[in-house]
């Protein structure tokens, strides 16, 4: 079974090139990212200087090769906009971080580009329109449906599919997978939390496509039935954090539908920005927060959150010693005991970005995802989010916001959300598209030949 790993990882490249021939390039990009993220194994092949060859880098390299071979014209016509500035800073910030700490900037910079920059760029290149985001939303919804049988199986049997299919165990701590009398599925991802956020996103999209009438049927099946099945499968993923994100996302979308306001979305984005400011500046007090959380969830359930907050406080103290550009990959962002043992546990994406690339890396990363959503919310007001043309983009905008909300507590890098951010950025940079249905003008009936003839002169 282990022989299947190199076959799939390196066989992806010719498959993607075939997809570029077989389908429109837009669809080929979506299929590649979704299928590779869901089904490729959790393995890493080290490459000198360059980032390790993983499912993310494999997808990016394959798509880039396909674009160069089959769609060079689109590549040469690409024009960056002001909303692309944050992702450019995010990708280039490791250069300064490394040089100021005496390290080589080559590998960390390429790693940042592959992890965030290229997925964003491909979303920007191909999906920056209402129709492009609609295709992406349907692709994610289809990916969620494809995962349903696997999540149900692992919910009963435990996270064993990676071992069964690829012959290696990518998830060793089964204790973290045991939840609520069953198992939290991992399938072919890094952690059950990743699966929870993925299924949450797919279920959210399904519900909104159904509620707005954007999609009536999918593969001949009623969209309502599929959305309900997907939502049930999501709840069986046993990811309580994703449950919270799901309900917040639904609240945002239905407030837009019923009250025609995007204030809940802007409030969440504002809260994320406020939390990052407070935490990065050292003003956050876990004691005050835990005094509120403990009575609600109980001390045992809240213990994990308290541990994260405690770790972030000491890691934040270390990060503030290199506040602007961080410590790079020197390891200086970690905390060590008196014997030189690393006692750090980094659970949150924000503290990792802050420690390694400083405030510049932290702000640029979160701005790359959230700023396009803010601009979208102003260009397409909440009253339009129920329109079948806008609904998929609105659902994706809310989903990427929920992902960044999750990144305040977890560190689950997912290229699909970078693709979404790139697509929304491309849409937000253009003038709002017309939502009026195109009128089809029927040809006029032929005029009757006049029975009155002109008199001949």
Image (spheres, rainbow, N blue to C red):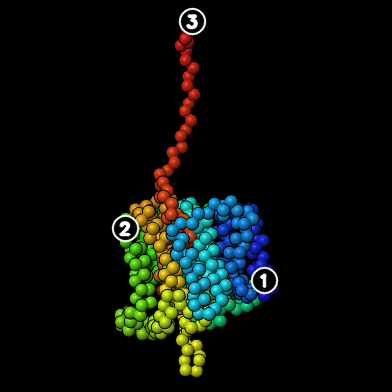
Q: Which residue is mark 3?
A: 457
| Residue 125 locus on image (x, y percent) | 52, 56
Could you say which is closer to the camera, residue 299 or residue 328? 328
Instruction: Say whether disc 3 or disc 1 marks the residue closer to the N-terminus.
Output: 1
The residue lying at 56 percent from left, 63 percent from top is 33
Q: CA distance from mark 1 to mark 2?
A: 49 Å
| Image quarter of the N terminus | bottom right
Q: Quadrant of residue 118?
A: bottom right
Q: Position of residue 356 (x, y in %)?
A: 48, 77
Verify CB contact (< 8 Å) between mark 3 and mark 2: no
> Is residue 290 among the parts visible in the rendering?
no
Element assignment for label 2? loop
Query: Residue furthest toward the right?
Result: 3
Give how far apart the Cα atoms at labels 3 and 2 are: 73 Å
* Nearest the eye: 273 or 205: 273
Q: Residue beneath label 1, please?
A: 6
Residue at the spot of label 2: 261
Which badge, 1 or 2, is on the more N-terminal residue? Answer: 1
Identified at 49% across, 75% down, the residue is 97
User: Which numbered disc flags the more N-terminal residue, 3 or 2?
Assistant: 2
Q: Is residue 434 left or right of residue 219?
A: left
* Residue under the image location 66 percent in, 67 percent down: 10
- Horizontal side of 341 relative to 275 (left or right) equals right
Instruction: Pick whichever, 402 or 105, lies toward us.
Output: 105
């Amino acid at each position: 079974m282990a022989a299947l790993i190199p076959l799939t990882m390196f066989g992806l490249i010719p498959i993607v090139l075939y997809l570029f021939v077989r389908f429109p390039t837009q669809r080929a990009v979506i299929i590649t990212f979704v299928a590779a993220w869901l089904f490729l194994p959790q393995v890493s092949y080290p490459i000198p200087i360059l980032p390790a060859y993983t499912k993310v880098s494999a997808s990016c390299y394959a798509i880039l090769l396909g674009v160069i071979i089959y769609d060079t014209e689109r590549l040469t016509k690409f024009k960056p906009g002001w909303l692309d500035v944050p992702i450019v800073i995010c990708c280039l910030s490791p250069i300064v971080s490394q040089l100021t700490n005496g390290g080589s900037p080559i590998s960390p910079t390429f790693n940042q580009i592959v992890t965030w920059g290229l997925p964003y760029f491909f979303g920007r290149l191909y999906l920056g329109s209402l129709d492009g985001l609609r295709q992406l939303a349907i692709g994610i919804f289809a990916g969620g449906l494809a995962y349903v049988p696997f999540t149900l199986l692992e919910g009963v049997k435990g996270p064993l599919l990676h071992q069964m299919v690829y012959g290696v165990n990518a998830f060793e701590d089964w204790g973290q997978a045991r939840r609520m009398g069953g198992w939290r599925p991992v399938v072919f991802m890094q952690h059950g939390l990743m699966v929870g956020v993925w299924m949450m996103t797919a279920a959210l999209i399904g519900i909104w496509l159904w509620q707005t009438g954007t999609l009536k049927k999918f593969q001949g099946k009623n969209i309502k039935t599929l959305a309900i099945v997907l939502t049930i499968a999501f709840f069986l993923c046993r990811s309580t954090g994703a449950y919270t994100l799901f309900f917040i996302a639904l609240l945002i979308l239905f407030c837009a539908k019923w009250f025609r306001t995007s204030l809940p979305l802007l409030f969440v984005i504002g809260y994320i920005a406020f939390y990052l400011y407070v935490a990065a500046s050292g003003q956050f007090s876990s004691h005050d927060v835990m005094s509120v959380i403990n009575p609600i969830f109980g001390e045992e359930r809240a213990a994990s959150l308290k541990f994260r907050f405690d770790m972030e406080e000491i890691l934040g103290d270390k990060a503030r010693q290199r506040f602007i550009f961080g410590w790079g990959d020197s390891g200086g962002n970690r905390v060590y005991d008196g014997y030189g043992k690393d006692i750090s546990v980094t659970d949150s994406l924000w503290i990792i970005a802050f420690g390694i690339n400083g405030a510049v890396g932290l702000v640029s990363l979160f701005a790359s995802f959230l700023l396009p959503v803010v601009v979208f919310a102003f260009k397409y007001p909440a009253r339009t989010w129920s329109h079948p043309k806008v609904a998929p983009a609105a659902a994706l905008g809310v989903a990427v916001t929920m992902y960044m909300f999750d990144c305040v507590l977890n560190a689950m890098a997912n290229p699909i959300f970078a693709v979404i951010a790139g697509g929304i950025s491309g849409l937000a940079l253009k003038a709002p598209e017309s939502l009026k249905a195109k009128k089809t003008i029927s040809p006029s009936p032929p005029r009757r030949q006049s029975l009155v003839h002109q008199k001949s002169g």
